């Protein structure tokens, strides 16, 4: 397990998350490790790995929080607000770290997933699979197309 990558990513995320939000990003090491295996298949520098792992963590926790939204759940409001904040934070984080093309790539499927979930269809949506597909497409094209907004 690449503990250093995970620790560096957590540090970056905690530094950028609003302390007022009071959100703790907690993911199982197994979940992170699976995504790190995906990252290792691509030729990426360490900084970009941190940014992509950060995006993955943010989305995974946002999806998890919204998945915990049931009518009589004692933390219903908190889960809704946390999930919504994390989706906004994902966009901010991705833009700040020059991953606009990734956001554009994932936006249609992410929005479809959110709409289906709002209608009670809790289909499985794994950000790792979408990031991997984006990286494969990026490699086929030969380079990143946009660097920042």
Image (spheres, rainbow, N blue to C red):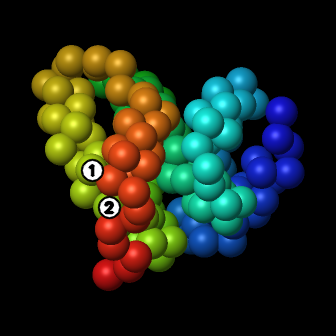
Image x and y of residue 99, in percent: 42, 64
Q: In the image, what residue occupies the spot 51% across and 72% down?
A: 97
Q: Residue furthest bottom?
A: 149
Residue 127 quadrant: top left
Q: In the image, what residue occupies the spot 85% across and 51% down?
A: 4
- Number of numbered discs present? 2
In the rendered view, tell whether residue 112 sits above or below residue 91.
above
Image x and y of residue 83, in percent: 41, 46
In the rendered view, tell whether residue 73 sits above or below residue 102.
above
Residue 40 quadrant: top right
Image x and y of residue 70, in percent: 35, 23
The image's mark for residue 101 is 2
Question: In the shown orientation, is residue 78 left or right of residue 7?
Answer: left
Disc 1 crowd rating (10 Å Cα; few below 14, some 14-19, many 20+) is some
From the viewer's side, name the closer residue of 124 and 83: 124
Q: What quarter of the picture does the C terminus occupy?
A: bottom left
Disc 2 crowd rating (10 Å Cα; few below 14, some 14-19, many 20+) is some
Residue pointed to by mark 1: 105
Label 2 residue SS: helix
């Amino acid at each position: 397990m690449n503990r250093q990558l995970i620790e560096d990513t957590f540090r970056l995320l905690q530094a950028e998350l609003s302390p007022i939000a009071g959100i703790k990003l907690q993911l199982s090491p197994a979940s992170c490790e699976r995504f790190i295996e995906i990252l290792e298949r691509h030729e990426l520098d360490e900084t970009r790995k941190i940014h992509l792992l950060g995006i993955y963590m943010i989305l995974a926790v946002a999806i998890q929080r919204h998945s915990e939204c049931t009518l009589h759940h004692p933390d219903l409001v908190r889960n809704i607000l946390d999930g919504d904040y994390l989706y906004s934070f994902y966009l901010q984080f991705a833009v700040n770290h020059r991953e606009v093309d990734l956001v554009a790539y994932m936006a249609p499927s992410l929005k479809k997933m959110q709409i289906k979930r709002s209608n009670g269809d809790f289909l499985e949506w794994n950000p790792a699979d979408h990031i991997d597909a984006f990286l494969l497409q990026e490699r086929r094209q030969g380079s990143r197309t946009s660097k920042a907004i």
